Image: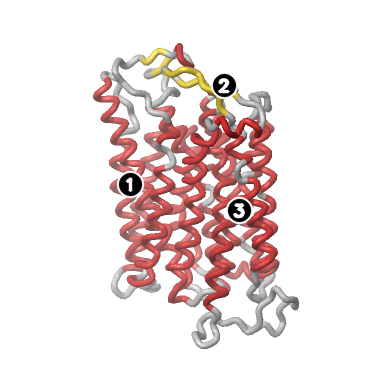
């Protein structure tokens, strides 16, 4: 990658060629990966913060309908998909340093806003929709961060590097969903603002500090932005917006988009909706199970222990992110296509099995608990196989495309797949849960056929 006509300045590298082992600065590459991964984790925290807050809004005093809550949880996905279309063209234009530092600093706005509006249940619905949309900045960043990181590594390590960055970044989803229930109930954070009263069916009311779930991240956002500005460099890959659009003349751009919708679209969509699904199927949101609110609520199925969504929802993103990290080195060793094939087959089976748990049987506590267990384990399997596919598809793209195009394709496919939370919210609201899951089975079947035909079979046109 020659820098003869690159922007001048101390942040811009010169004569950077990661394929030349003799001159490649591995220390700089891994330092870049570390800093951008830290910032990307904060991006995912900001993106999925609403998904951790929204399922409990009514329990702290709001009175939104089920449809309104689904739309609210879907909005960050819509925003992220749209913003990724912008962020995907920024790496060659802004460079890694400016893009990562500025993006991280922008996270301050939605995270602060959710904290302020969680302190009292008085915000109008439209205002929460705006905050949910701004949270999409964190999702949009992915399409800029990942391509820019790929510029720093040789092809032989791109599966591992991108898998580590995306996988650890994805841990931000699990982090915010795991930490939120704990942090809001910690009395030591009383100084973060006024408390709220949370009502839970069958349990005494308790005092919480919901804004702490947001405010706790603000110092880390400022630190991340500062570190990025101080220590990152930029690779001088020259391409304006028009030049970057040449990826759309390559059919593999569209095939890989379809595959990444299956993997990351599923991961992000279910991460955003998992809490609401669990609550509406097997928790206090199902009127066939619970009537009333708070300590006075009546559990209609005798002996049934109503699950609290916050105790389970972090597990899905945790498993998906962990699979992405653990399987990335295997994709470098074995190729990505075979693991994308395994991912698709696994998704067909796990979605199919989960469908049996999407219709709660309220005949008895035993049948209801059995259905809940099938639903929960099915969901965790879906997250596992989507995480494997997230790792393998990101290994395939740098192998199929030349470096500049690979960066653009990574950004584009990530942009479309980021609509996952929005599409899942729309699908669940308009189609119903069971029909929407059957759509997932059909999509996975098509992706398995595509992967085998184009990338995985002996003599495939684009083995990767």
Disc 1: which residue: 381
Residue 278, quarter of picture: top left
Disc 3: which residue: 140
Residue 316 higher or lower than 141, as above or below: above
Residue 91, quarter of picture: bottom right
Determine the secondary structure under disc 1. Answer: helix
Residue 208, quarter of picture: top right
Q: Earlier in the sequence, mark 3 or mark 1?
A: 3
Q: Residues within 10 Å of mark 3 (few under 14, many from 20)?
A: many
Disc 2: which residue: 197
Q: Which of 349 and 286 is in front in this view?
A: 286
Q: Earlier in the sequence, mark 2 or mark 3?
A: 3
Residue 65 higher or lower than 12, as above or below: above
- Describe residue 360's horizontal placement relative to residue 419 as left or right: left
Depth check, mark 2 against mark 1: the one in front is 2
Determine the secondary structure under disc 3. Answer: helix
Q: Residue at x 58, y 59 (%)?
A: 143
Q: How far apart are marks 2 and 3 (CA)?
A: 34 Å
């Amino acid at each position: 990658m020659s820098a003869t006509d690159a922007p001048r300045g101390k942040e811009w590298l010169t004569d950077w060629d990661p394929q030349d082992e003799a001159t490649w600065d591995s220390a700089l590459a891994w330092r870049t990966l570390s800093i951008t991964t830290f910032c990307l984790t904060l991006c995912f925290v900001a993106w999925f913060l609403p998904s951790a807050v929204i399922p409990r809004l009514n329990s702290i005093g709001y009175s939104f309908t089920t449809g309104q809550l689904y739309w609210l949880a879907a909005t960050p996905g819509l925003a992220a998909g749209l913003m990724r279309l912008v962020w995907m063209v920024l790496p060659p234009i802004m460079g890694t340093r400016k893009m990562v530092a500025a993006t991280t600093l922008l996270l301050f706005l939605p995270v602060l806003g959710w904290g302020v509006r969680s302190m009292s249940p008085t915000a109008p619905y439209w205002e929460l929709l705006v905050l949910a949309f701004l949270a999409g900045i964190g999702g949009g960043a992915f399409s800029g961060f990942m391509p820019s990181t790929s510029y720093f590594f040789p092809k032989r390590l791109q599966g591992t590097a991108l898998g580590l960055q995306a996988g650890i970044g994805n841990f931000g989803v699990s982090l915010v969903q795991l930490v939120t229930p704990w942090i809001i109930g910690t009395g030591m954070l009383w100084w973060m603002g006024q408390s709220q009263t949370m009502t839970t069916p069958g349990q005494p009311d308790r005092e919480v500090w919901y804004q702490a779930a947001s405010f706790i991240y603000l110092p880390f956002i400022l630190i991340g932005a500062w570190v990025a500005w101080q220590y990152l460099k930029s690779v001088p890959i020259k391409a304006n917006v028009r030049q970057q659009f040449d990826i759309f003349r390559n059919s593999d751009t569209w095939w890989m988009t379809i595959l990444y919708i299956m993997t990351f679209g599923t991961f992000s969509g279910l991460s955003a909706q998992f809490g609401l699904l669990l609550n509406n199927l097997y928790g206090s949101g199902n009127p066939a199970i619970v009537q009333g609110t708070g300590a006075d609520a009546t559990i209609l199925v005798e002996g049934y222990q109503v699950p609290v969504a916050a105790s389970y929802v972090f597990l899905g993103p945790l498993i998906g992110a962990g699979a992405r990290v653990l399987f990335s080195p295997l994709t470098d060793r074995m190729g990505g296509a075979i693991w994308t094939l395994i991912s698709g087959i696994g998704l067909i089976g796990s979605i199919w099995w989960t469908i049996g748990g999407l219709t709660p049987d309220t005949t008895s506590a035993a049948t209801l608990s059995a259905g809940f267990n099938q639903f929960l384990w099915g969901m965790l399997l879906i997250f596992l196989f989507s995480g494997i596919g997230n790792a393998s598809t990101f290994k395939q793209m740098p192998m199929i495309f030349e470096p500049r195009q690979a960066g653009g394709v990574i950004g584009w496919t990530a942009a479309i797949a980021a609509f996952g939370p929005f599409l899942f919210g729309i699908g669940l609201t308009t189609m119903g849960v069971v029909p929407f899951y059957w759509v997932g089975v059909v999509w996975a079947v098509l992706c398995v056929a595509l992967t085998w035909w184009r990338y995985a079979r002996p003599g495939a046109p684009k083995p990767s």
